Amino acid sequence: MKFIHLTDPHITASGSLFEIDVDARLRDAVASINTHHSDAAFAMITGDIAHWGEAGAYARVQEILSDLKMPWYPMIGNHDIRDAYFTGLPDAKSNGAGQACFVVNNDAGAFIALDTLTEGTHAGQIDAAQMQWLDNALSQASGSVFLFMHHPPMLSGIQALDNIRLQNSDELWALLSRHSGKVRHLFFGHMHRSFHGSWNGIPFSTVKSIAHQVVADINQDKPLVSSREMPAYAVVLISSDTVAIHDISYLEEHTAFAYDRENGRPEE
Ligand SMILES: [Fe+2]
């Protein structure tokens, strides 16, 4: 089973952010996915759909992502505005109580998406009602679970990001540990860079933002520094014994070359 993980498109009504053409970056991602991975079961977009949360930004996203050849599931992030998100993305899934948490069931298992947005802060939180919802979703999942959220629950070593990670990660872990062994992988956004490892034994990953990236100022107490590094999306391949993740730097596809293994020279 194949799916696409893309994150943090930060689309604006103007189409530009920090002098980056975020509109074009998202359109180019869609074109690359459709060309090379149209067999993906779906695309999951782990939050910060819009940078400022304007209605015009969500209208752009709706138009651009509607070109994908597979179903796509947006999630909410700290830059999103809840009312504008649900108004501008009419097919966005929710739990029916105004939170953008949902389950997508597939032959590979249950894909559970959480809503970690608390408006007024860039840090993340899962409230008590959603913890109960997650507890029920995990209880109902009979096979593998793949968990998605915008905010990472673990420390990264980038202090400015760690300050705005999920604030009640201990509570989340206490719940997950009661369903030990169910979650095979945790996917999130928010980091704006490649970042992967394990948290309490659960493998995790994110992928570069579709928009700007964050510089890895590790173990330094300083404000976030962004960069115009190239974006990426991830292709995830799931089988009974493996979760394989490929980050695709889709704006650098033109740099590909084959080479002659006999003489080591690039082929004409
Ligand atoms: Fe973001």
Image (spheres, grey):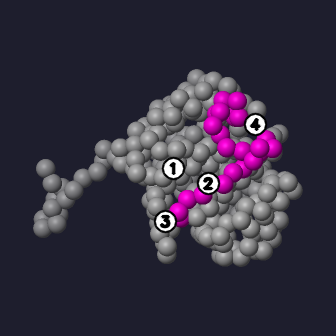
Which of labels 2 and 3 is toward the front?
Answer: 2
Tell me the residue that label 1 is attached to: 42
Looking at the rendered structure, the secondary structure element under dot 1 is loop
Residue at left offset 62%, top offset 49%: 46
Residue at left offset 69%, top offset 51%: 102
Residue 153 location (% of width, % of height)? 72, 61
Q: CA distance from mark 2 to mark 3?
A: 15 Å
Give the total of numbered labels.
Answer: 4
31 is within the stretch colored magenta: no
How dense is the environment of label 1, judged by Cα within 10 Å: few (below 14), some, or many (20 and up)? some
Residue 189 location (% of width, % of height)? 62, 51
Which of labels 4 and 2 is toward the front?
Answer: 2
Which circle's residue, 2 or 1, is located before the other in the chain?
Answer: 1
Q: CA distance from mark 3 to mark 1?
A: 13 Å
Badge 4 vs badge 1, beta-carbon distance below 8 Å? no
Residue 198 location (% of width, % of height)? 62, 71
Which circle's residue, 3 or 1, is located before the other in the chain?
Answer: 1
Tell me the residue that label 2 is attached to: 104
Tell me the residue that label 4 is attached to: 82
Highlighted range, magenta: 85-108
